[in-house]
Amino acid sequence: MGRVLIAGTASLLMCIFLSPRFIAFIREREFGQNIREEGPEGHHAKAGTPTMGGLIIFTAVAIPFLILTKYDWKSVGVLGTALACALIGFVDDFTKIVRRRSLGVRGRTKLLATIAISIGLWLAATKGAHLPDTLRLRIVDAQIDLGVFYPVFIYLVVAGTTSGVNLTDGLDGLAAGCAAIVLLAYIGITYITTGQGDLTLLAGCLVGACVGFLWFNSFPANIFMGDTGSLGLGGAIAGLAVMTKTEVLLVIFGGIFVLETLSVAIQVFAFQTFRKRVFLMAPIHHHFELRGWSETKIILRFWIIAAVCAAVGFTLFQQSIK
């Protein structure tokens, strides 16, 4: 694990040393976060906080990885997926900044881009890494041959994970901390499945970059990761799930992301159907804010939930390979 430790530490240190200069650069150009008017009142004070910190995260991931990797299909496919999703996020962030509003790229454009990325991940997994078009259930000893529907399933994994991480990115350090926890579990999973391979190396770089970014993103945040970071990290997690055949277990690993996504879906369904709201505000972390919980309390408790979900998922994965 020496190579993984070196790469992860390098990513962490790069984030810590590059972030102050990047923050100053963003401040000089007034590339600050636009806050939704309908968001919690306390968030309006965060308007203007430097954003697009995902650029720092993926710079810190890519440089050590590209220096130390042996360029196998699995790891390159995951990194390509992450960077492509981060690119969508960057265009979204930049559009918001230029237009000075909280709405970015059109939904149709994001949909088409996500479909293209999912096809690329499918090709890397099946044609490059020669993985089968099957779905390993893991929870039970069974698998399903998806055949031609496997690319559609991969799209659902990528779209669902990127959306989940993006929705979770609403409090200082919440998404970065939860993503680091899930990715830490994937260091163990990739080590078990591939040994000290490039996939483990990439997972180590991702964890290191998330932890390094937290140094400046923790409450009160000096910088936000923006959609560049949240979509990129979601793409990385989705790619790791596909390459390790843990797509089903990802529902458990990323339980906190599932919870955030479900809260939005429930809120929308309840309001459109019954004209009533289940939560004071969705995603659910805003509900607890409006109930009077401090931001740090919500973040820490959600990190705990993320850790429990990752531990349960990792235990189920170990049992599935015995």
Image: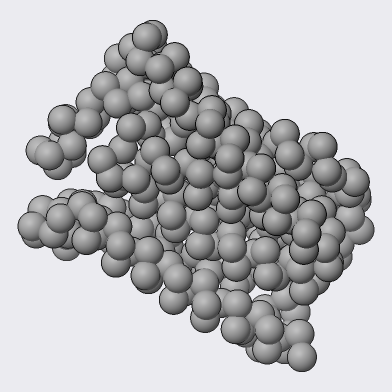
Tell me where residue 103 appears, x and y as whole percent: 34, 25
Comparing 198 with 20, the one in front is: 20
| Count of marks, rendered view | 0
Which quadrant: the N terminus? bottom right
Which quadrant: the C terminus? bottom right
Tell me where residue 261 appears, x and y as whole percent: 38, 57
Q: Does residue 217 appear left or right of residue 234 in this picture? A: left
- Name the residue: 72% across, 34% down: 63
- Name the residue: 87% across, 48% down: 73
- Name the residue: 76% across, 85% down: 321
Q: Quadrant of residue 277?
A: bottom left
- Examine the rendering and report whether any part of residue 271 can be seen: no
- Name the residue: 12% across, 39% down: 42
Comparing 291 with 117, the one in front is: 291
- From this view, report whether residue 26 is shown above or below residue 195: above
- From this view, report whether residue 235 is shown above or below residue 183: above
Tell me where residue 130 appears, x and y as whole percent: 91, 58
